[in-house]
Amino acid sequence: MSLLHFAALASLAWPLLAQTPAIEPVSVPSTAADLGRAILAAGLDPSACYRVRDLEISQEDAQFYLTDGFLIFGKPVNGAPVAAVFSSEVEGGDAEVLLLPPNRSERKTLAGYTGTPNLDEHFTNAVFLFTEAEARALSEKIRSKGEAKNSPEVGAVLADQWSSTVANLSTSFESRMVLDLMEGAAEQQGFFEAIIHGRKLGNFDLLYDAHLEEQINAGQLTSRDGRSYFDTWTSFTSRSHRNAPLPAPEEEILSYRIEATLDPAFVLHCVTHVRFRARPDSRNVIPFDLSAQMRATEATIDGVPAEVYERNSVRTDLVQNNGNELLLVVPPQPLAPGSEHELEIRHEGKVIVDAGHQVYFVSARGTWYPDRGAQFATYDATFRYPKNLNLVSAGKVTEDRTDGDVRITRRVPDGRIRLLAFNLGAYESKVLDRSGIEIEVSANKEIEDALRYRPPAPVAPLPNPLDRIRRQPRGLADSQELTEPFPPPIGNANPTNQLSRVADDVAAAVEFYRAHFGEPSLHRIEVSPVPGRFGQGFAGMIYLSTLSYLPVTVRPLSLMSSAQQVFYGDLLRAHEAAHQWWGNIVTAGLYRNEWLMEALANYSALLFLESRNGPKFLDLILDQYRKDLLAKGPDGDTSESEGPIVQGRRLESSNNPNAFTTVVYGKGTWIMHMLRRRMGDAQFLKMLAELRRRYEWKTLDTEQFRLLCAEFVPPQSPDPKLENFFDQWVYGTGIPGLKLTSSVKGKPGAWKLSGTITQSDVPDDFNVTVPVEIQTGKGKVVRQVRTSSDPVSFSIPVGLANAKAVLDPGFSILHR
């Protein structure tokens, strides 16, 4: 493949990146904007092209071996290059990249995509982007040693063919590079991105980023059914970071004060005041997450103008899968450790979508203002908006008045929260008071366009929504889903008719959780509708699908299963109410622990609904989840087999786009249920209460959860630390097929029941402890049998010739 051919392929592989216009180089960057322009304008330097042989580049666990070929560097930015291109387009040219994931789970995931548990790929070409210190110094090192032949003639050809591709790709990492290069931060927090054309695997990415919680990431941009994905092949903590504690955000956020004005065109204009304390490792650049639909325009720190810098990056959004952009604020002078400051950021954008008939959708519910690691902080928000609408948000109403055509409402939550959300519409509301907890439920007076009958357009059956409870939509695909037409016939249903039912259900759920888990995060809870088929729970703020406000007689019964009716009628309300505790008091940080908050909220909801509807209701939902987990996706594999639950959002891949929700909610619920059966009901509830007490206002990780659960398992448990349980159900994959055969032999007075359990569909090292209920003639006994790759037999004296044995009668184990 020629260099020109691969350059063309590279531009096709990243079609969402616009061609970068020609920019004049900036000689001495003095601001973040100057530095960004310099990065994009640098291009490749023909005079810095070398014929290299047996050159090794190491980035922690990733090793690059440039066996023979040409390596051309970019022009210096702040004294050294930030880009290079390697080409093996010479006789006998070759290069190789090696990456060895450190644990079995990541090796298995990598093998699922590449066919091998260790990445060992020969490649023809690669683009390197970097701020990491050793990579920046490589050009000078090669030049000073004189071991590689300088080839400016080849460099001119390579620069002509690759400069536009390098500039294109740099736009995806521009903000990240600016963050590092300001004041030399790359010495500690550098990154190295390789976009590689492999001989077998095609184009793929390999990233080392010291600023991330998992520094090594390898994967591939791909598409399916018109949607783009970044399939993460493997992601893990690099060698030098594995035993280090997770770093805290460089700045401690103390408070937010927000002034938000919604103009008649539904553009939101905000002034956000952030009070923060600098820590010893604070940078001279303060990064924030901000919705891609918002744009920061200016900032001050302690009243002194500060630079704001933001670049839109579609590629980074796909990799991070969160719909946000990196916003940088550059203080006018370094921040002294321990000093407190007030940052003011002005930003604006259209984060509110009109779904028709005065039904609105706030598309950036958690990042419509600059966010810094979702820290607990106090909030004070004032909203100005058209007076013909109602606006709800977390916190007590401390001011509510009109000024001409504008309504002004001030909300002040009575405690620290992590995120502040809001919603608006033409509402009718109902307020309930439950022993000091005020619950206000709002409903739109009409339904959105997507729910109205619009013949004769064909519609597909709705997917099962039991796996659709999402706390944070993550990008374009969710926006498309929210506006997808629903099947007829709904017509002009009035959601306000169900206000009392919705309010009573949410209040009952909150009372149940309060009795078992303690006080909620806030003592005022707002409930309001959103278009679409999902819900979301913030502190003091609950979003429910419009379908949750419609009675069974109005929902499209012919195209909705009984499980879907349960979801919209009961489960969604109870699940989002449970997030007042799980997610907004106890939280999870790293994406690998996200499953905990969803599983805890969902199983808490099922505990509540079980108390209302009986145990058969719980069995129905668990059985539906089991079927969903065993359903096969587009790649022919089951959803559960796509990866361990701790892979979180990585499961949402081109292989099976539904695997994330199916595994995190479905398997997560089963994991909680199996723990409950192992502990017993009383101990399980005690565990949940202790979980809230011990980790309130803190982040919880999976290992901390395992250790806490181990404190509540019965004495003499065969797995006292729950290590085997978590290895298989949490860190591994597999749903065993279990078959019980039994017979009774002997004579009157000496009957013996003998049974055998055979396990299938899982690896040889998979085993579970499964209960077998046996009729003895004097009652029933339960024998716990541990399975293995070979059939396992057991026997027990019984008093009946026709005694029976029943495998797992109480839905204690997830199995086929």
Image (spheres, helix red, strand yellow):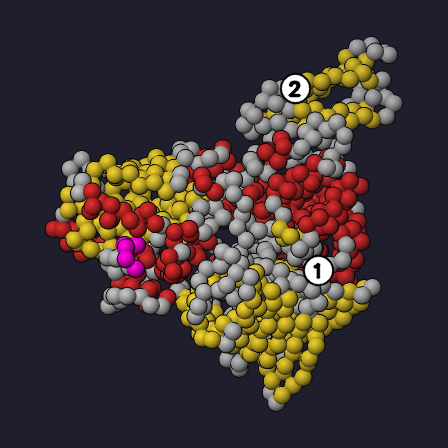
Task: Give residue 717's position: percent from left, percent from top.
Answer: 73, 28
SS class of the residue under badge 1? loop
Looking at the rendering, the stretch of residues picked out in magenta corresponds to 78-82
Amino acid marked by disc 1: Ser
Tell me the quarter of the picture where residue 57 sits. Answer: top left
Judged left or right of residue 341, residue 795 is: right
> Does label 1 or label 2 sit earlier along the sequence?
1
Closer to the eye: label 1 or 2: 1
Q: Residue at x 43, y 70 (%)?
A: 332
The residue labelled by disc 2 is: 792
Residue 685 place in picture, x, y as percent:
77, 45
Q: Residue furthest left?
A: 153
**184 vs 675: above or below:** below
Q: Name which residue lies at 45% across and 51% down.
A: 211
Left or right: where does residue 538 sit relative to residue 121? right
The image quadrant where one finds the N terminus is top left
Instruction: Judge by depth and name the residue closer to the eye, 61 or 495.
Output: 61
Q: How many marks?
A: 2
Q: Nearer the viewer, residue 730 or 662?
A: 730
What residue does disc 1 label? 521
Asked where in the image residue 558 lies, by quadrant, the reply is bottom right
Whether residue 497 is visible to the viewer of this picture, yes or no, is no
Q: Residue furthest bottom?
A: 404
Q: CA distance from mark 1 to mark 2?
A: 49 Å
